[in-house]
Amino acid sequence: AFYMAYQGQVDILVSMYHDHGLTPLKMIAFDRGINITLGLPIIRTSPDHGTAYDIAYKGIASEQSMAEAIRLASALHRP
C-alpha cells in the first residue's frame, strides 16, 4: 500500500497503529509529512517529525511539515 501511495496511485493511507504508518511516511516525505488523528471531538493534526532539539537555534530546521499540518487543520475546519 505504501508503495502505491509513493507511486501516486492512491491519495490517502489509513494505518491502524501510529508506528505502522509513520515509519514508511517518514522515509518518503519527512519534510512535509503530517498525521491526523480521527475519531476525536476536535481536529488534531501534527507534523511527522520530532522536536529536533539537536538542531534547535541553528537555523537549519524546516517548517514545511508544521505548515502542512496547519493547512490541513484549516481545510478540515467547518464553522
Image (spheres, rainbow, N blue to C red):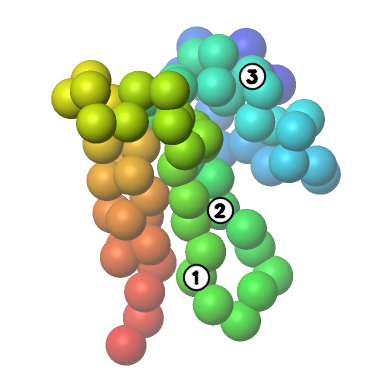
User: Could you tell me which secondary element the residue under label 3 belongs to?
Assistant: helix
Q: Amino acid at mark 1?
A: Ile
- Please state the total of marks drawn on the protein image: 3
Where residue 18 sits, quadrant-wise, is: top right
Q: Amino acid at mark 2?
A: Ile
In this rendering, position of residue 74 left or right of residue 43:
left
Of residues 37 and 57, which is closer to you in this image? 57
Residue at the far left in the pictured view: 59
* Residue 4 rendering spot, x and y as whole percentages: 60, 16
In this rendering, position of residue 18 left or right of residue 40:
right
Of residues 49 and 26, which is closer to you in this image? 49
Up-down: is 28 above or below 15?
Answer: above
Up-down: is 40 above or below 45?
Answer: below
User: Could you tell me which secondary element the residue under label 1 belongs to?
Assistant: loop
Mark 1 — residue?
43
* Callout 1–callout 2 Cβ contact below 8 Å: yes
Where residue 72 sits, quadrant-wise, is: bottom left
Mark 2, Cα crowd under 10 Å, few <14 / some 14-19 / many 20+, is some
User: Could you tell me which secondary element the residue under label 2 belongs to?
Assistant: strand
| Nearer-N-terminus badge (1/2) | 2
Mark 3 — residue?
24
Residue at the far right in the pictured view: 16
Specify whether residue 42 is in view. Answer: yes
Where residue 78 sits, quadrant-wise, is: bottom left
Q: Residue at x 65, y 74 (%)?
A: 40
Marks 3 and 1, how far apart in space? 23 Å
Quadrant assignment for the N terminus: top right
Mark 2 — residue?
36
Up-down: is 19 above or below 72?
Answer: above
* Residue 69 rendering spot, x and y as whole percentages: 38, 50
Marks 2 and 3, how far apart in space? 15 Å
